Amino acid sequence: MNASSADENPDVLLIGSGIMSSTLGAMLKNLKPGLKIQLFEAAEGFSPEASDGWHNAGTGHAGICELSYTPNYGEDGEVDVNKAIEIFHQFEHSKQFWGYAVREGIIPEPTTFINCVPHIAFVYGQPQVDFLKSRFKGMQAHHFFEEMTFTEDRETIKQWAPLLLDGRDPNEPIAATKMDVGSDVNFGSIARQFTQWLDKQDGCSAVTNHKVVDLDETAGGWKVTIKNTANNTKLVRNAKFVFIGAGGGSLPLLQKSGIDEAKGFGGFPIGGQWLICEKPEVFEQHGAKVYGMSPGAAPTMAVPHLDIRVIDGKRALLFGPYAAWTTKFLHETGRWTDLIKSIRLDNIASLIKVGLYNIPLVRYLIQQGTQSMATRMKELKHFYPAADVKNWKLIDAGIRVQAIKKEDGDAGIVHFGTEVVTNKKKTISALLGASPGASVSTNIILEIVKQCFADEFTTPDGHARMKQMVPTFDEDLIPDAMAGRQRETAHQAERSLGLRADVGSIPA
């Protein structure tokens, strides 16, 4: 629908077309079909930023192989796996909602956005091997991870992922864990298909080249001023509810809203780059996602991994990410002045303290952004010792703006996670932060819907609709007594998504 012909008073206005906004739009329209929803994207195309295929790791984070989610030993001397269990639980909601979208024809073909890929955690050196062994002990004891296997046997690891052993020192201690029902996800594809579906629904529209430039609170919601960047005209919408899901662009818009809940928030942008290999003779030897341990001061989003990717039907091998210092908040439409313009009297103390207390992180980001190709290849060779520089090229990844806020009376803590900010009236929500955001997008959006559209859950019809979309949205699958229920709902979603038909393989 053309933006100028759309209703001037929508029930819901979505800013940005990434995985968060598009998921919220699709969920709300299915929950209450009569809602009028409008989505505005500043860029020329839908979902061009952090959700885009090559801007996002696309791992389908479920806590299976991401060692950064289990970094610490507990009081019992074993690795604490509670965070991995929590993330797995949240990812179940995403699988359920995506499975529903496929069954309902919202997304016609699952292979356009998700493919089954084993998830492997790989370590080298005896201290790392001991860590992984303890982690496996805790995880495999929980029903979420009962299919996980562990090995220190080199031949077994070679069968799982041959490149890991190619050229490796035979005396180096190594170990790995593996689960076959992992996934490779193109979040940009999901977002675009949700957005395109929404645009076709009665009372809804989704347009590009329209940038939200101002937000003013009204008695009935929000007056939103939008600029058409194609012809420099402006239009105004009066919405009952606004969702700011603009990725790195969310913080400036949240600040424009003037809500009390936004005060004190700052943003810490982190750029990223990948090495990719599109040589069939190389990537055909690697059919998994392999995660390692974080190198020193690296943020969560920079934990190294060697992944097979399936994007728009094409396969390639990805390694990284390499983090980098940047002052831009968006990859496509951001400006180098974004960080400076985000500084306010209420957040300047937090930003200064980040600089003072995170000097190793800042030094790491600068070093990462200025390193040579030879240095990047050295990091890759920790995973793939025989890697040849001629087969790899460097590309840019997305930018993540990490939320900085005052917490527990101490300012300047960098939060490597997802932060949802909602006002007291429940008329506006904004999403800040990064990993594991996209993977647990359904869980995050569920919490926003529960907060801001609570009345829809109290009706029998609304509750039934939500149970169709996310069968366990109001159930806790973590206790052992829920193992059967978890398997039942997981297998239903996995069959709808094609993840159980041929476990451990991806399309040629």
Image (cartoon, rainbow, N blue to C red):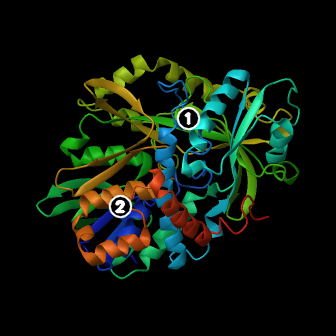
Q: Is disc 2 in contact with disc 1, using a CB cutoff of under 8 Å?
A: no
Three-letter amino acid code of the residue under disc 1 = Ser
Pinpoint residue 268: horizontal percent, then vertical percent: 42, 33
Amino acid of disc 2: Asp
As drawn, the residue found furthest toward the front would be: 481
Q: Quadrant of residue 379?
A: top right
Residue 35, given in percent of the width and then of the height, sits at 29, 75
Few, some or many C-alpha atoms within 10 Å of disc 1 (few <14, some 14-19, many ≥20)? some
Look at the picture and state if 334 lies above or below 175.
below
Residue 100 vertical position relative to residue 155 in the rendered view, above or below: below
Question: Is residue 381 in view from this perspective?
Answer: yes
Which numbered disc, 2 or 1, marks the residue that appears first in the sequence? 1
Q: Dot 2: what SS?
A: loop
Name of the residue lying farthest toward the left: 219
Q: Label 2: few (<14), some or many (≥20) within 10 Å?
A: few
The quarter of the picture where residue 500 lies is bottom right
Name the residue rendered at 39%, 71% in the picture.
467
**Front in this rendered view, residue 61 or 252:** 61
Q: Residue 143, image x and y in percent?
A: 55, 51
Q: What SS does tag 1 mark? A: helix
Q: Report, in whole angstroms, how far the alpha carbon at label 2 lies from the one at label 1.
A: 28 Å
Answer above or below: position of 362 versus 334: above
Numbered label attached to residue 170? none
Quadrant location, the N terminus: bottom left
Q: State the residue at coordinates (25%, 55%).
A: 428
Label 2, on which residue?
474
**From the viewer's perspective, is 118 left or right of 452?**
right
Residue that label 1 marks: 68
- Residue 487 spot, x, y in % from top left: 55, 62
Which quadrant of the rendered structure holds the C terminus?
A: bottom right
